[in-house]
Image (tube, rainbow, N blue to C red):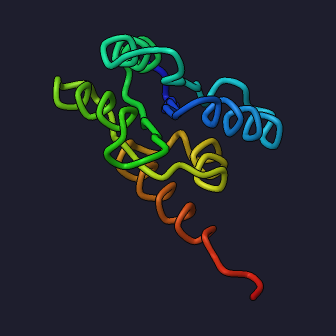
Amino acid sequence: MSDRLKGVVVSHGRLGQALVEAAQSITGNAEALIAVSNEGCGRDALLDRVQQAVGDEPCIVFVDLPGGSCFQAAATLQHDGTAMTVVAGVNLAMLLDFVHHADDDLAAAADRAVQTGGRAIQVLAR
C-alpha cells in the first residue's frame, strides 16, 4: 500500500475532470487525483467506474452533490466495506489542499479538505 492517499473525484459530466486537470496544473502532481464521470452511464455502470478508480487502498472520494447519483455510488462502496471517506461539495481549494496533505491519515485528510473547501466559499464583493 502506498503511503499517500488517493483522491477520486466523482461528478456529473466533465466537472471532475476539469477540477482534476486544474489541480494537476497548479500542483504539478498528476498522480494524487483520478476523475470519474457519470456521463453516459446508469447506476450499475457508475458504481463499476467508481469501484475501479477506488481500488483496494484507502482513499477519499470527492463528489459534487450530496445525495446525487455520484454520492450514491460512493456511499454504496463505503457501505460494502471499502476503506474510504466520502466528501460532498468538491471544489478546487479542497482538492489542492488534499494533494498537499495526501500523506495524512484518511480522517485528517478529509477533515482538512472540508475545512479548506468551506473557507474558500466567500462573498468577496457586493
Front-most of residues 87 and 126: 126
Front-most of residues 123 and 5: 123
Relative to 61, residue 116 above or below: below
* Tally of numbered tags: 0
From the top left corner, tell me how far across and down residue 5 is, in percent. Answer: 48, 32
Quadrant of res 69: top left
Relative to 78, residue 41 above or below: above
- Tell me the quarter of the image containing the C terminus: bottom right
**Residue sitting at the far left:** 80
Front-most of residues 47 and 117: 47
Q: Would residue 113 appear left or right of 56 to someone viewing this image?
A: right
Residue shown at the point (42%, 37%) measured from the top left: 60
Q: Is residue 7 visible?
A: no
Residue shown at the point (52%, 40%) measured from the top left: 103
Residue shown at the point (56%, 63%) measured from the top left: 116
Q: Is residue 122 visible?
A: yes
Relative to 87, residue 14 above or below: above
**Residue sitting at the far bottom:** 126
- Tell me the quarter of the image containing the N terminus: top left
Relative to 111, residue 124 above or below: below
From the top left corner, tell me how far across and down residue 37 is, in percent. Answer: 54, 24
Front-most of residues 2 and 77: 77
Q: Would residue 14 appear left or right of 40 to someone viewing this image?
A: right
From the top left corner, tell me how far across and down residue 58 is, in percent. Answer: 37, 28
Residue shown at the point (58%, 71%) measured from the top left: 119
From the top left corner, tell me how far across and down residue 10 is, in percent. Answer: 49, 32
